[in-house]
Amino acid sequence: MEEEKKISIAVIKRLPRYFRYLGELLENDVTRISSRELSERMGVTASQIRQDLNNFGGFGQQGYGYNVEYLYQEIGKILGLENTYNVIIVGVGNLGQALANYTNFERRGFVVKGLFDVNPRLIGMSIRGIEIQDIDNMEKFVKEEQIDIAILTLPKSKAPKIGADLTKWGIKGIWNFSPNDLKLPKHVIVENVHLSDSLMTLSYKLNVRKLEQRQRSKKRGELGLGSPDHKNRRN
Amino acid sequence: MEEEKKISIAVIKRLPRYFRYLGELLENDVTRISSRELSERMGVTASQIRQDLNNFGGFGQQGYGYNVEYLYQEIGKILGLENTYNVIIVGVGNLGQALANYTNFERRGFVVKGLFDVNPRLIGMSIRGIEIQDIDNMEKFVKEEQIDIAILTLPKSKAPKIGADLTKWGIKGIWNFSPNDLKLPKHVIVENVHLSDSLMTLSYKLNVRKLEQRQRSKKRGELGLGSPDHKNRRN
DNA sequence: TAGATTGTTAATCGATTAACAATC
DNA sequence: TAGATTGTTAATCGATTAACAATC
C-alpha cells in the first residue's frame, strides 16, 4: 500500500518559486547550493526548504548540498513541465489577446490551439496565426482537437455557463481569469487568477500603511514635535 | 496604548472574496445574511467568517446575522477602496496594454495617469487618450504628477532597476507582473501577480491528477478488470 | 578524517474549528 | 419570551522552525 502523503497547497505554491530561483542560479553557472544559502537568497528558512523538498524525495547530499541542475530538473518533473497540453482561450478581449500573444506559456507545455469569442468584430481576426472563432464552434473544436485546458477571460456573467459546458465536453483544467469562483466537479482542475482580488489586497496594504503613518505623526504631534513628513504630498 | 493585533496575510487575502460575495448578495437584493449561510455559499466555515470579521470589529448582531449592505461597505473601507491613487503602467507590451484598457481598476480607485515604454514603435501611441511616453520621462512625471502606484509589466531583466528607481522617486506601491521578487525597502508595498507561477501550479495539479488516474487504472489492471477509461483520449 | 549539510524527528507557533455564553 | 446567531474563548489541527543524528 502506497503512503498517501498529502502535499499541502502552501508547499505546492512554493515550488514554482524554487524553480525560478534554481533557474537563475543555473543561468549564473552555480552548480551547487546548500539549503542555507538558498534560504538566504529567497528570504525563507533553510528548514522550510528541506522540509518542502523532502515531501517529494531526497534530492541533496549530506555535506554537499544540492546539485542545482539536478534539483531544477527534478522540480520541473514534479511540476509536470514535461507534459504538453492543448489549450484554448475563451474570451479574446484585452486580457485574452495579451495571453494569446504570450509565447512563453509554450515553454511550460501549454500550446494554444484555438481562440473563441462572441464578438463578431473579433471573429475572423487572427493572433499568431490562430483565427478567432465563434464560440458556437467551441464544442466541436474541444472534442475534435482534444483540448485539455481552457483559459477563461470572460465577463462574470458568462463564466459559470461556459465552465459547465467545458466540463461536460471533457476539459481537464481551467486557468480562470474571470472574477468568479467556478463551482465545478473536483476532477476539473481550476487555477484562479483573480486580478481584482489582488488589486484589493494591494489597496488594503496601502491603506494600512497610510493609517500607520497617520498614527505615527499623531504621536509626534502629542509630543509637540513637528512632523518630518512635510515632504509627503498627500494624506 | 493601542492593541497591535497583527492581521495575518491569510485573513487579508480572504477579504476581497468576502467583498465579492457580499456584492453579489447586494445585487440580488439580499438584505441580511448569517455567517452560516454565507459559509455554505462560499465553501468555508462559519467560524472562520466570524473570526475573520472580528479582527476588524463586530459588524453583526446576535440573533440577526449581518446586514449585507453595511458589511459590504465596512469591508470596502477596510480594503481602503475609498482612497484614490495615481497610477502609471511601466512596460506597455501585451499585458501592459490589456491593463491600460481595463477601466474597472478605476472603480477601485486606481486611476491610470501615464504609460511608459522603451520601444520607439510604441512611444507616441495612445491608449484611452493616454500617450505612451519614453521611459526616460518617467522620473519627472512620477514626481510632478504625484504618482503613487506603478504597475510593472516588464521583462525580468529590467524590473529590478526600475523598481529601485521608482522607490527612489517616492513610489508607494507596486503591482508587479514581472517574474521577479523585487527586493525593495519595506515601506514600498509590493503585490505580486506571478502568472508563470500560477501556470506551473496548474501544471502540478494536472500532473498529480494524471498520476492518480494512472495509479487507479493500474490497480484495476491488477484485478483483471478492463479500464472504463477507454473514452479518454490520452494519458 | 573533520567539516558540512542533509533528512527527519521533535518542539513551537499560528491558524482553523468547535463550543458556548451573551444578547439581539 | 423563545429562537437565532453573534462575538469570543478554548481545543484542535496543521504548518513552520529548531535540533541533531546520519552520512557524504
Image (tube, coloured by chain):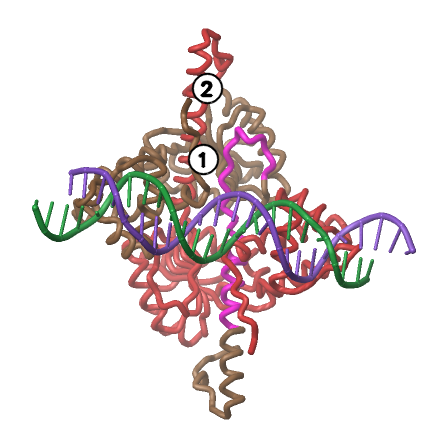
Chain colours: A brown, B red, C green, D purple
Instruction: Work out which residue is located at the far bottom of the displayed protein and give it.
Output: A224
Q: Label 1's element?
A: loop
- Location of residue B214 (image quadrant): top left
Q: Is residue A124 visible?
A: no
- Location of residue B83 (image quadrant): bottom right
Question: Where does the image place residue A118, in percent across and percent down from the top left?
Answer: 58, 36
Q: Quadrant of the N terminus of chain B?
A: bottom right
Q: Is residue B187 visible?
A: yes
Residues in magenta?
A182-210
Question: Where does the image place residue A226, in percent across and percent down from the top left?
Answer: 47, 90
Residue B216 tag number: 2
Mark 1 vs mark 2, foreground winner is 1
Q: Is residue A21 above or below residue B109?
A: above
Task: Provide the residue designation for mark 1.
Answer: A6
Question: Where does the image place residue D22, in percent across and percent down from the top left?
Answer: 23, 38
Three-letter amino acid code of the residue under disc 1: Lys
Three-letter amino acid code of the residue under disc 2: Arg
Q: Is residue A202 magenta?
A: yes
Q: Residues within 10 Å of mark 1 (few under 14, many from 20)?
A: few
Q: Residue at x 50, y 21 (%)?
A: A143
Q: Nearer the viewer, residue B167 or B189?
A: B189
Residue A40 tag number: none
Relative placement, left or right, of D10 versus A198 is right
Question: Where does the image place residue A55, in percent across and percent down from the top left?
Answer: 36, 38
Q: Quadrant of the C terminus of chain B?
A: top left
Q: Label 2's element?
A: helix
- Chain letter, disc 2 residue: B
Q: Residue at x 48, y 8 (%)?
A: B225
Q: Is residue B81 magenta?
A: no
